[in-house]
Amino acid sequence: MKPSGIGGMAAIEGVMMRNKDEYAIAVRKPDNEIIIEKTEHKSFSDKVKLFKLPIFRGMLSFVDSMVIGLKVISFSSSFIEEEEKDQKENKEESGKVSALLMFFAVLVSLVVSISLFMVLPVLISSFFTRWIESIFLLSLMEGILRLLIFIGYIILASRMTEIKRMFMYHGAEHKTINCLENGFELNLENVKWQSKTHKRCGTSFMLFVMLISLVLFVIIRPETLLWRILSRILLVPIIAGVSYEFIRLAGKTNNPVMNILSKPGIWMQALTTKEPDDDMIEVAIQSVDAVFNWREFLAEVTETVKDEADITDDTKKSKRVKKDSSIKDKESAKKEYAAANEILIASPKIDYEEEDDEILRALDKYLDFDEEK
């Protein structure tokens, strides 16, 4: 499997695929037509190089994902009950939405997320202080509560019809990316049998935020409630940055250890990805096609596999040549050793100081050979 660098997310009746600074949203309208909008998104890291560094790039990626996610949901939801004419008018109006409104939308999303997953577990666990005096046990309880709230949130959300369909589009997104990264041509038949899970999934990212926070907050245990809440809020960017680095590394390697560590995120995706139908896969394929030259990518994958195969064959040939050469050397050594040994047997009182150098070298050579055996 070769990483493609493509990321994506499910939308309302659609899929967004992102490749570097470009992303495309493909949405199937009620009349069955697929609309595609391609947009360029310049990362803030182009202006501030600090956010290209490990951990910091994860912090920025977390915020970037929220910004793009709001745009994607806004765009895709506008097709639900509107005709094409009305959509064009709204599209013109949406282009006038100020950056300030987007900022507040992202801010509200962050406040809700942090309150639900970071602050609420602290408040709930604080009720048990009258029975539990150990800060360690309270912190452990808090981490477990955080994990349960996250899982419960997903389970409750999955009961909604609209969310169920988004989870199906989520599965289509993963299957399409897996198809490419496994080296198969991007078509319906190839995509259908691919896995609906992926190690770089946002679900895995969020789960590792919960798991890493559990470990970190068991270590960092302020005694007062105020400082416990503040520490949870202030450390969110660092936790997000560390989680991002883990997911990024996991997506680039097939290392057995990383595969094992990625398992919890893969298991969690059973809740957030569902098997898509053919129409959903078609939408995902068109979204990829809009921002990614997958034919060129597959050609590179094929060439890489061929080069690796050639290198493997050359290595095997080289080993065979060395082995054959070694066998010949040893056989030759045996013959020379036997000849030298006959001379010694015939002349048991031989004076080594006066003996021919060639015989002595032969003897040394065979003595070494015997030690190797």
Image (tube, rainbow, N blue to C red):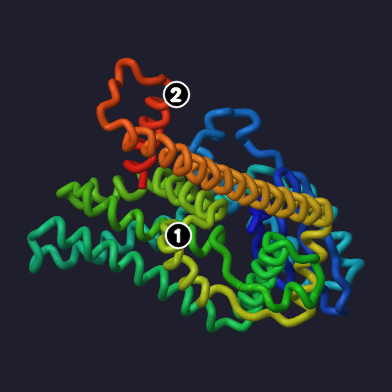
Query: Which element type, helix, strand or loop, lies under badge 1?
Result: helix
Q: Which residue is mark 1?
A: 256
Please say whether residue 103 is visible from this viewpoint: no
Locate residue 149: give its quadrant: bottom left
Whole-percent x, y for residue 126 in the image: 19, 62
Query: In the rendering, at what x and y percent does residue 111 appear?
Result: 46, 54
The residue depicted at 54 percent of the width and 61 percent of the height is 199
For mark 1, does the 10 Å Cα neighbourhood hold few (<14), some (14 to 19), or many (20 or more) residues? few
Which sits earlier in the primary sequence, circle 1 or circle 2? Answer: 1
User: Which part of the image, by quadrant, shows the N terminus?
Assistant: bottom right
The crowding category of the residue bearing disc 2, from other C-alpha atoms within 10 Å (few below 14, some 14 to 19, many at least 20), is: few
Viewed as shown, does residue 246 lie left or right of 40?
Answer: left
The three-letter amino acid code for the residue at tag 2 is Glu
3D distance between C-alphas at marks 1 and 2: 54 Å
What residue is rendered at 46% in x and 65% in y? 265
Observer-nearest residue: 346 or 208? Answer: 346
